[in-house]
Each structure stands twice: as structure tokens, then as C-alpha cells.
Amino acid sequence: MRTSRTSSIASVVGSAFVWGTSFAVSKLALRSIPPLWLAWIRFVLASTILLVWLLFRHENLRLDRRAFGAMMLGGVLGYALNHLFENVGLVLSTASEISLMMGVFPVLSLLVEGLAYHRRFSHTTVAGIALSVVGVVLIVDPRSLGGTLGGKRLLGDGLIILSGICWAFYSILVKNLSTNSSASRTAMFQMAFGSVVLLPLAGVFERPVFPVPAAAVWAVIYLAVFCSVGGYSLYNYGVARMASTQAVNILNLIPVFGVLTSWVVLHETVTVMQLAGGAVVLLGVLLSLRDSSLLASPS
């Protein structure tokens, strides 16, 4: 029992680590690859890996009309739009700031879920949500928003909030999907459908850059193999063996890993105000989730 608990915790911590590193690695890739093309390549690679795995296991890949629509919508919300906003946000802002902003995702999911199902929030939950909003304001730090660079940062942070809202609606959709579909099968179809949506958008709004430096190629491979395939596999293994609230609390390590990776890989600096904001967001999330079994996964 102890070994099973340890392995489940280690799995979720591992998923938090690879998802946390994805921001700095994406920022590195975005120096050479436009944001929409980056998302498209990442999910084509990841869905191909999962397809090979599913074929190896002889899983049924047929979809009925209802499942097709749900998978398509999941691909649009959870993969195409979510990563479109995230990648463009990373271009405009810093990886460390985006990492800290991701800490508010569980609260966004809680808000959207509450509004969708007309649930009343407890006083504790409302206090947690309010605290998270204060934390976001501290992370953005209005005093540093002067000039063109400040405006771009603010726009980038706003796009991350939109990314979080897309993920919140996606989370509701996933909860309502039939349990007959395995996690690997669901992820493969949704990544594939997300890629189908991203391709024409990338073709119209962006021009691919050639040749692509080796560092960017390795970054894309890391994002596809470790973040998209490995991260979700570790998370699904761990969350199946622990309470969902415990998993959510562990995922709050994502901003920590994100900031550390941004510092090591990109040599970014974080202000004391931003660190304080990240801590306030974390406190708000923990407070708001006390009465909830919400489950959220960032990237």
C-alpha cells in the first residue's frame, strides 16, 4: 500500500515537473518557430506516438457520431485554442510570469464549473477566489506596465487567462465523456482534432521558418514526448490512485518548476512582488479547493 501511494505521488509530481518545464522549453522553441506552427507540430507528433501505442494494444479506434463531436470539441478547446492562447502569450510575456499565472487555473475551472452547474460557492471558496485575484494583480504588477513592453506583457497575461478559461470548459467536457474511452484514446483523438484545427490557422496567419535550429527541434520533441504524452500518462496513473484534491494540490508545484526552469534555461528574473503574488494565488487555490473535488491539468 505504501509503495502504491509513493508511486502515485511520484507520478503526479513528475507530471507537474514536465508541465512546469514546458513554458521555458516552449519559449525556447518560439524563438524559431511561430506559435501556431509550434502547437501543430507538437500535437501531430504526440498524437502519432499515441496512435502507434493504441494500434500496438489493438484498441478500437472507431467513433460514433456523438463521440466524434465530443472529441472534436475537446480538441478545439483543450488543445487548439488552449495552446494557441498559451503560445502567443509566451511570445508576449516571460515564461516565469506565465508559469506563475498558470497557478490560477484551478480557480478558473472552479468558477466556470460553478456557473455551468449553477452551484453556490461557500464563503471559504469565495474568499479563496478573491485571494487568487489579488495574487494575479501582484504577479502582473501594474507599476511595471508602462510603455510598449508593459502593454505586450499585459496582453500576454490576458491570453493566459483565456487559455485557462478554455481549459476550464474542456475539463467539464472531459468529465461528461463516456468512460468507455481510455485516456490514451481520448487524448490521441483530441490532439489529432486539435491539429486539424490548428493547421489552416497556422497556414493563413503565420509563415513557417526554415531551416529550424537543432535546439528548437529538440525543444519540440521534448514538448511532444515528455509534456504531451509523458505528462498526461504520469498524471492519469497517479490520479487514479489518490484523491483528486490531493492531485490538484500537487499540481500547484507547476509554477514552482516553471519559474525555476525559466531561471536556469532562459536566465529570466522574477521580482519579489511576482513571487509574493504566486504565493497568494497558491493560498487562494488551496482555500477555494477545501470544499471542492475539482480536478485540473494545465498543459
Image (cartoon, rainbow, N blue to C red):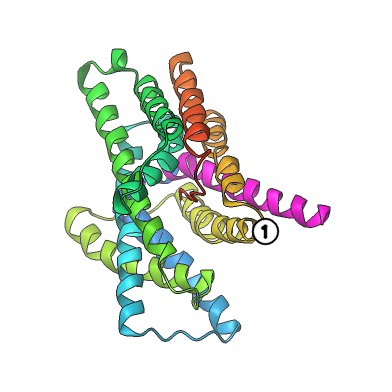
- Residue 119 visible in the snapshot: yes
Most foreground residue, 299 or 263: 299
Looking at the picture, does residue 53 appear above or below residue 238?
below
Q: Which residues are magenta?
A: 1-27
Residue 49: give x, y in percent of width and height. Answer: 52, 71
Q: Main secondary structure of the magenta part?
A: helix
Considering the numbered disc 1 on the image, is that residue within a helix, a strand or a loop? loop
Q: Nearer the viewer, residue 68 or 129?
A: 129
Q: Is residue 158 above or below residue 5?
A: above
Q: Residue at x 54, y 61 (%)?
A: 229
Asked whether residue 93 is drawn in magenta, I would say no
Residue 18 magenta: yes
Residue, x 42% and y 27% (percent of image)?
A: 127
Q: Residue at x 51, y 41 (%)?
A: 291
Residue 258 falls left or right of residue 35: right
Amino acid type assigned to the residue bearing label 1 in the image:
Arg
